Amino acid sequence: MKLITKYFPDLNPEQLARFAQLESLYQEWNAKINVISRKDLDQLYLRHVLHSLAIAKVCQFAPGARILDVGCGGGFPSIPLAILFPEAHFTAADSIGKKIKVVEGVASALGLKNLTPHWGRVEELGERYDYVVSRAVTEMPRFVGWIWNKIERGEKGSLANGILYLKGGDLAEELALTGKRWSLYDIPSFFDEEFFATKKVVYTAK
């Protein structure tokens, strides 16, 4: 928790309480359905929660913004972002049912009314969104193909509507293949921890 308050010192009591609950909730769920490796579970706030919140250092979502998390796994980045932006609405989608079961359980225990879990492929979703977030689910050209037509033009936050994607390593070739213009934000410019050394938030506007 100290990691979260170090970089987000203005959290209200409800947000602090929800972030504090995450560790015990994920330990409880992981004992039933293994969605996070033991090593990562021991570093939950660094490797999952704070990593997810790097998106918030790049874009602040406005009240009423609709955000789709593609391949959410156990709920990252959508659950930490839903805690941080209680007036935005998040759809957490994954094609693996047991992962969505964990998301449902954690969101319910936290009382997160602004997060809707969705079990299924994102291509099946009929709605449109202001932003799409994700964490290294597939190569960028394929990812863009899945979701580009689901993004509404506009500006429901501090950046124009678009994609905010957490990824590491050398991305130049992969991003070039999408035919879009990307901005890269180095996570070490927000967070000091060594874990983030090669990690980035990549963004493109619709």
Image (tube, rainbow, N blue to C red):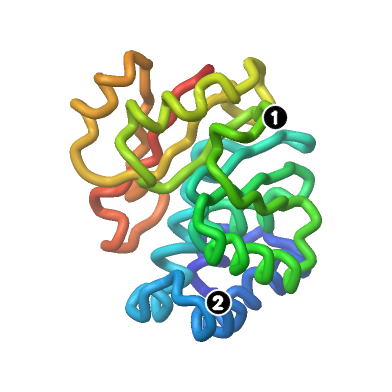
Residue at 19% across, 26% down: 173
Compare marks 2 and 1 and give the one earlier in the sequence. Answer: 2
Residue at 57% across, 79% down: 29
Q: Is residue 1 above or below residue 7?
A: below
Q: Residue 91 versus residue 18: which sits nearer the camera?
A: 91
Q: Which residue lies under the disc numbered 1? A: 127
Please tell me how crowded label 2 is: few (under 14), some (14-19), or many (20+) other residues with Cα within 10 Å. Answer: many
Residue at 33% across, 14% down: 179
Q: Residue 58 versus residue 144: which sits nearer the camera?
A: 144
Quadrant position of residue 171? top left
Percent x, y of residue 14: 77, 67
Percent x, y of residue 135: 42, 48
Quadrant position of residue 175? top left
Quadrant position of residue 184? top left
Residue 26's mark? 2
Percent x, y of residue 69: 56, 44
Percent x, y of residue 201: 40, 40
